Amino acid sequence: MWQKIWKLFQRDVSVVEAGPTSSRRSIHLTPTRSGRGLSAAGKVKTFEDAGWRYLHLAVRIDLHDGTPLAVLVNHEAVGSILVSGCEAELEIGVSESESALHSLLAMRGIKTGMVATLDGTAVLTGAFPTLAQRAAANTCETAS
């Protein structure tokens, strides 16, 4: 399982292969002060394909097997994961008919991702860059 998670950290393609018309985004989650004490690391990937929206989260964290963690997008809970062998992952796929979650997972609508203990202590956080931040990054890359 660890090799599978590590490969997900290293590549930009999700477990579910996206078609040629899909839009993909990914970020690394950084540990909070609490997360650094737990050697936490993670990655969130999102993409759309054929009317479906997907979110894939993979974490490794030094917690006991069976420890539950909450997964939040834009500070709203979207699921929970259980640690097993210092790893956990979540994949959510929603169709257009599941409108509330589908809207929450809209590519342009996802701003933040967080993993927290059930008592609300954030251990991993990350923010997707805005369109302006991505444009500025591309400008800097092409100027180099």
Image (spheres, rainbow, N blue to C red):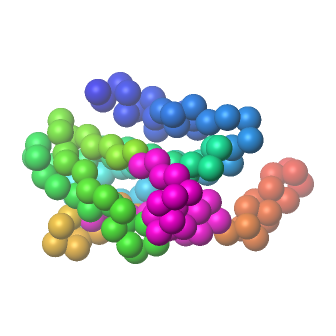
**Viewer-side residue, 141 vs 81:** 81
Relative to 106, 125 lies left or right: left
Is residue 60 placed above or below 36 in the rendered structure?
A: above
Q: Could you say where residue 116 lies in the image, as x and y percent from the top left?
A: 27, 65
Q: Quadrant of the N terminus?
A: top left
In this rendering, does residue 59 appear at all?
yes
Q: Is residue 30 magenta?
A: no
- Residue 108 covered by magenta stretch: yes
Region in magenta: 92-116
In this rendering, the answer to whether 97 lies above or below 84 is below
For image coordinates 27% across by 43% down, the residue present is: 88
Outermost front residue: 97
**Total of numbered circles in the picture?**
0
Give the side of residue 36 with respect to residue 45, left or right.
left
Instruction: Answer with left or right where residue 3 lies relative to residue 127.
Output: left
**x and y, in percent, of residue 131 in the image:** 73, 67
Measuring 80% from the left and 56% from the top, which residue is drawn there? 138
Residue 121, quarter of the rendered image: bottom left
The spot of residue 100 in percent (x, y) is: 47, 69
Residue for point 79% across, 65% down = 136
> Quarter-wise, where is residue 35 in the image?
bottom left
Which image quarter: residue 123? Answer: bottom left
Drawn side of residue 26 relative to residue 141, left or right: left
Along the line of sight, which residue is nearer the eye, 96 or 49? Answer: 96
* Residue 27 makes an appearance in the image: no
Q: Position of residue 115 (x, y in %)?
A: 32, 61
Most foreground residue, 128 or 47:
47
At a point 30% along the width and 29% down the height, the residue shown is 2
